[in-house]
Image (cartoon, rainbow, N blue to C red):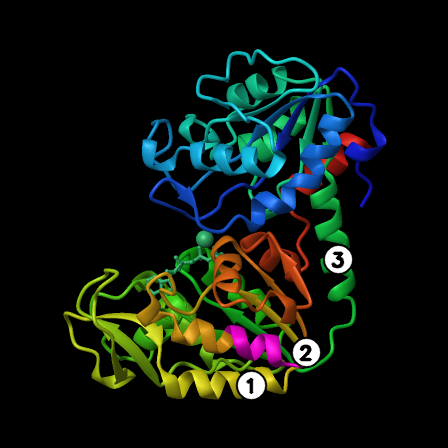
Amino acid sequence: MSVIRMTDLSLDGKRVLIREDLNVPVANGKVTSDARIRAALPTIRAALEANAAVMLMSHLGRPTEGQCDEEFSLQPVADRLGELLDREVPLVGDWIDGVDIEPGEVVLLENVRFLEGEKANDVELSRKMAALCDIYVMDAFGTAHRAQASTYGVAEYAPVASAGPLLVAELAALGKALEEPARPMVAIVGGSKVSTKLTVLDALANIVDVLIVGGGIANTFIAANGHGVGKSLYEPDLLDTARALVTGGEGRAGIPVPSDVVVADEFSADASATNKAVEAVSADELILDIGPDTSTRFAAILKSAGTIIWNGPVGVFEFDQFGNGTKALAEAVAASDAYSIAGGGDTLAAIDKYGVADGISYISTGGGAFLEFVEGKTLPAVAMLEKRAS
Ligand code: ADP
Ligand code: MG
């Protein structure tokens, strides 16, 4: 990878625009897991110590693009970042036409997804972002798989486009860990971004030996097997894809589908949890976790793994009664002798919640980005930095 590194540049007195991935879980105006914020701290501190005027950009959640929505404001992130840096971090609402800032200061720019054209990598928006700075720093490993205005377009037009220390460290660590992985290699893919992750599974199935599925992804496999999944999160358009994956083939990963699940009749913090066989889910129920038999079966697979990669909780672990599957797998990953890599915003929150960080070999800030990296793809944001360095 030949890119310009932030650490090779003189930042003294320069306007430095840093794209971080500060997309963290927030509840009631408070950050509930700050792992991604802490991961960005060394980069932010280094830029401040070098006397740069530091402008931080990030997205948070999935707001309707082009609309400011209080629910997706980065204010809780600015508050937490301020505590960690022990200085005030102002949140700038209207920033795209210019930011008032002096060297040695730091501001957080409001959610990039409030701007029309962010996701489509709009040229005009990208140029405006680029015009804010002397040096652009891409440090958001977790968003490096997306070619958007704040991760890709801006790097095309900024006077200088460089890679931040976190991005460089993530790429190096993951590259090394995956050079010659010990077998069997087991992946756990769960969570709620079903359509994006299901398409990654096809490539992953060529690389890993066993693919454990959970969350909305598992629900899609359960439905593909002909079972009713009621009101569960799943992807009806990808049933054929799921069937083809399960059929496998020469050198393809085995995919053990859950045999029991935990259901509720509503999606809420105080819904009551019931264990059921997958065949028994009724039309008005939602599957919110894998069941205890399935957890035991999956934990045994993890125990004898040589390498484990994990992205995505296997249930709605934010509600304790639907967290047992994720807890059991988190503990099995931590107890396993395998080299284990875990990543993803909510996955990091689950690791925090169950206190298993010490048992995991490498914790990445990326989820989707890390899965695409495992596939062997060059991440688009990195490709742009390489282009700008050549
Ligand atoms: P990550 O951030 O680690 O990449 P995702 O964002 O894809 O993971 O998914 C995390 C979310 O998936 C969690 O908020 C969790 O509640 C949700 N989830 C897990 N299982 C289910 C399920 N069965 N139904 C609905 N949501 C689920
Ligand atoms: Mg997430």
Q: Which mark is residue 173?
A: 3
User: Secondary structure under badge 1?
Assistant: helix
- The answer to which quarter of the image holds residue 374 is bottom right
Residue type at mark 2 is: Ala
Q: Which one is nearer the viewer's eye here, 123 or 381?
A: 381
State the residue at coordinates (59%, 39%): 84
Whether residue 367 sits left or right of residue 221 in the image: it is right
Instruction: Count the labels in the image.
Output: 3
Residue type at mark 3 is: Ala
Q: Residues within 10 Å of mark 3 (few under 14, many from 20)?
A: few
- The answer to which quarter of the image holds residue 47 is top right
Give the extent of the magenta segment: 330-337
In magenta segment, residue 37: no
In magenta segment, residue 336: yes
User: Secondary structure under badge 3?
Assistant: helix
Q: Look at the picture and state if 104 lies above or below 265.
A: above
Q: CA distance from mark 1 to mark 2?
A: 11 Å
Q: Residues within 10 Å of mark 1 (few under 14, many from 20)?
A: some
User: Secondary structure under badge 2?
Assistant: loop
Q: Which mark is residue 301?
A: 1
Q: CA distance from mark 2 to mark 3?
A: 16 Å
